[in-house]
Amino acid sequence: MKRTTVPAPVPSPAPLPSRAPVPSRALLSSLALVLGAATVLTACGQEGDGAAADKPGDGGRPTVCLVMKSLGNEYFQVMQKGAEKHAKERGDLDLKTSGIQNETDIDGQVAAINKCVTQQADALVIAPADSRALVAPLKRAEKQGLKVINIDVKLDDGALKSNDMKVPFVGPDNKAGARLSGDVLAKKLGKGASVVLLEGSPGADNARDRTAGFRASVKAGGLKLVDSKTAHWETDEAYNIVSNMLTSHPGIKGVLASNDSMALGALKAIDAKKADVKVASFDNIEAIRPYVQKGRVVATVDQYAAKQAADGIDQAMKAVKGDEPTGWVKTDVKVVTADDLG
């Protein structure tokens, strides 16, 4: 006899817990396309020379920070413009420039360095306000992956060694440049003439080198150095110092100024005293040239601020690409007199 199997009754399913609505097929398809595109972009970024290619919004171009000293100093204004022009001509990097309030604003430069790290820059080109104090912050930046290039003012060798750093220097021979300028003044004044010296910031390597160069001119030219003080590269401070020097040493015939900003302060003090005093200086900024043409400043020194910045940027880009520069990339200096300006 044929048997008939009756299936057992299926129990009713337990109610499902409430949850968010299931996305539509159209939405899922859109999400898949976005994720797919992101995967392709990430893969492309990994094929570049480094992490710079992975940064959003920069088109894969490296970012180079240029940290300068006081942008109130015409020399660094020229440097900034030259750097921006060079970066535009290269067209393969993003340049971020910054300066500080005054020549001794070390904290301002430390803040600028930290900002470069925060912005995930690839390289940092710096004209340090102090040759020792900036080394430790630069070491921290280096540990975060930034390539560091030193321009204009050399970082202290001892401080670099103690921080286990080897930073290439792109800049001039400041001692030789100051000697060129001082020799012109010595020849103009003759042996036995009394002169004073305006030094740069004591912590800056270029200040020490320029002082050494001017002192070598004093010795070789038989001049008499009656006073030497720092005016920290600043015009107003130089005015006050030279005013006091002219009072204390009324026989002064010459001023050796370690930069043109201080020379301008010295000239203002000389005018106020109606003194017959010649000046030798350093930097060849636009504001000093009328005084050079008139013979009141017998010499200044062009150290080509724009080209220094451009060379520093070029070295930074080499470092980013893996071609690590080393040592001293020496830049030009040229003594400038009235004959050169016409």
Image (cartoon, grey):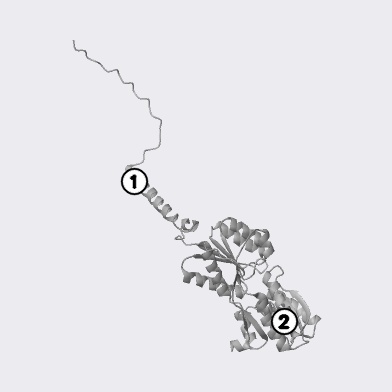
From the viewer's perspective, tell me whether residue 130 is left or right of residue 219: left
The numbered mark at residue 217 is: 2
**Number of marks in picture:** 2
Q: Is mark 1 on a helix, strand or loop?
A: helix
Q: In which quarter of the image is residue 214?
A: bottom right
Q: How crowded is mark 2: few (under 14 residues within 10 Å), some or many (20 or more)?
A: many
Which dot, 1 or 2, sits closer to the camera?
Answer: 2
| Image vertical order of residue 105 relative to residue 173, above or below | above
270 or 106, nearer to the observer:
106
**Figure quadrant of the C terminus:** bottom right
| Image vertical order of residue 220 relative to residue 73, above or below | below
- Kindly tell me whether residue 39 is visible in this rendering: yes
Residue lying at 32% horizontally and 42% vertically, measured from the top left: 25
Residue 159 drawn at (x, y percent): 68, 62
Q: In which quarter of the image is residue 135?
A: bottom right
**Figure quadrant of the N terminus:** top left
111 or 60, nearer to the observer:
60
Task: Report how far apart the C-alphas of labels 1 and 2 lie in the structure.
Answer: 79 Å
Which residue is disc 1 drawn over? 29
From the viewer's perspective, tell me whether residue 156 is left or right of residue 15: right
Residue lying at 66% horizontally and 75% vertically, measured from the top left: 174
Identity, as a three-letter code, of the amino acid under mark 1: Ser
Identity, as a three-letter code, of the amino acid under mark 2: Ser
- Kindly tell me whether residue 132 is visible in this rendering: no
Q: What element carries label 2?
A: helix
Residue 212 drawn at (x, y percent): 72, 75
| Image vertical order of residue 173 relative to residue 146, above or below | below
